Image (cartoon, rainbow, N blue to C red):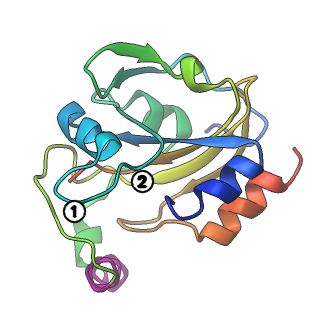
Amino acid sequence: MREALPEIRSAGADVLAVGTAAAWQAEALMDGYEGHAPLGFACVVDPDHNLYRALGLGRVAWYEWATPRLWRNYVGAFRRGARQGAVTGDIRQKPGVAVIDPDRSVRWVHRAVTVGDYPSVASVLDALTRRP
Amino acid sequence: MLQPGDRLPPVDLVTAGGDAVELGAFLERTLLVVAIRYYG
């Protein structure tokens, strides 16, 4: 998402990252750490899952840990250079991406089917440039 | 379940500095919210 930040801002939007925990990790990502550049957008935490519930983002059921898609996503992320840091949040929380307008209306939402199910940058940019 | 066009209720969050904040504080512009599982 960091690479698409100029296009996102050109579309009149900003980015907010939300995690289930922990504030110190959000701060490290915002400020940069161990040779990693600052993200360039705000990071917050939602320990009570308020936003996840509001957006209708589900949780990973026990049987879903056995699905090939979940493990393909893990392997794909590893191949792209992602490495697991300290686990401080809810590993069962499914992710999601949403476009929210200043009047609080939800223009678009992607609810992950499983872990690592994120929309493409192209589809996010399409949602941002599409008028409600 | 909330659908496109619906409005979000107040959503209480916590800043990276540990302070309480409501989502509306970030809604000066359209917001692309990326809700991940956890930072790690």
- The residue carrying pointer 2 sits among few (fewer than 14), some (14 to 19) or many (20 or more) residues within 10 Å by Cα, namely many
The residues bearing labels 1 and 2 have C-alpha atoms spaced at a distance of 16 Å
Where is residue B16 drawn, in percent x and y? 30, 28
Q: Which SS class for mark 2?
A: loop
Query: Amino acid type of disc 1?
Result: Trp
Where is residue A111 drawn, in percent x and y? 53, 55
Residue nearer the viewer, B40 or A57: B40
Q: Which residues are magenta?
A: A67-79
Q: Using residue A95 as the reference point, say whether residue B24 is left or right of it.
A: right
Query: Amino acid type of disc 2?
Result: Pro
Quarter of the image for the C terminus of chain A: give it.
top right
- The chain holding disc 1 is A
For the stretch drawn in magenta, the main secondary structure is helix
Q: Are marks 1 and 2 in contact (CB under 8 Å)?
A: no
Q: Single out the residue that lies furthest toward the right.
A: A131
Q: Are marks 1 and 2 on the same chain?
A: yes
> Which disc, if any, is residue A95?
2
The nearer-to-camera label among 1 and 2 is 2
Q: Which residue is mark 1?
A: A62
Q: Quadrant of residue A121?
A: bottom right
